[in-house]
Image: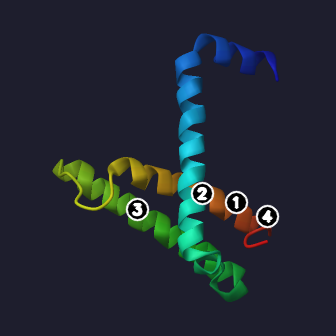
């Protein structure tokens, strides 16, 4: 751990603790959804280029949904806003795993 890392942890302990909590919640959501869907919904039959595009489309869908909800100040009927933000984080992580050739392995 670098001195900068230690400074951040010491200066912002509540922020860092909340970050760790959110990361664990994001992982839990990932595990639940992968249990439901499996890796094939992302891998697109092994076509890496198509899989990258599919993730970007999913990210765009989430962003558009969030923009709509935030602009309208509406309360979502199905999925809390926090879940949409967690999905965005998961899609980013999933894209990195895909790019590194480890998706579904």
Q: Which residue is mark 2?
A: 92
Q: Earlier in the sequence, mark 3 or mark 4?
A: 3
* Figure quadrant of the C terminus: bottom right
In the image, what residue occupies the spot 22% across and 60% down?
A: 77
- Label 1 packing within 10 angstroms: few (<14), some (14-19), many (20+): some
Q: Can you tell which mark lies on residue 100?
A: 4
In the image, what residue occupies the spot 53% across and 65% down?
A: 33
Task: Describe the element under mark 4 as helix, strand or loop.
Answer: loop
Q: Are marks 4 and 1 in contact (CB under 8 Å)?
A: yes
* Residue 37 place in picture, x, y as percent: 55, 75
Q: Which residue is mark 1?
A: 96
Q: Are marks 2 and 3 in contact (CB under 8 Å)?
A: no
Left or right: where 57 falls relative to 68: right
Q: Which residue is mark 3?
A: 62
Where is residue 48, by image quadrant?
A: bottom right
User: Looking at the picture, does residue 24 appear above or below residue 102?
Assistant: above
Alpha-carbon span between mark 3 and mark 1: 18 Å
Alpha-carbon span between mark 4 and mark 1: 6 Å
Alpha-carbon span between mark 2 and mark 4: 13 Å
Left or right: where 67 falls relative to 26: left
User: Looking at the picture, does residue 51 appear above or below residue 25?
Assistant: below
Q: Earlier in the sequence, mark 2 or mark 3?
A: 3
């Amino acid at each position: 751990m670098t001195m900068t890392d230690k400074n951040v942890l010491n200066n912002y302990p509540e922020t860092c603790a909340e970050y760790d909590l959110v990361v664990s919640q994001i992982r839990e959501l990932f595990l639940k959804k992968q249990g439901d869907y499996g890796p094939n919904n992302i891998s697109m039959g092994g076509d890496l280029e198509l899989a990258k595009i599919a993730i970007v489309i999913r990210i765009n869908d989430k962003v558009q949904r969030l923009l709509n909800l935030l602009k309208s100040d509406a309360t979502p009927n199905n999925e809390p806003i926090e879940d949409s933000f967690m999905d965005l984080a998961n899609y980013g992580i999933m894209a990195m795993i895909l790019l590194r050739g480890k998706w579904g392995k």
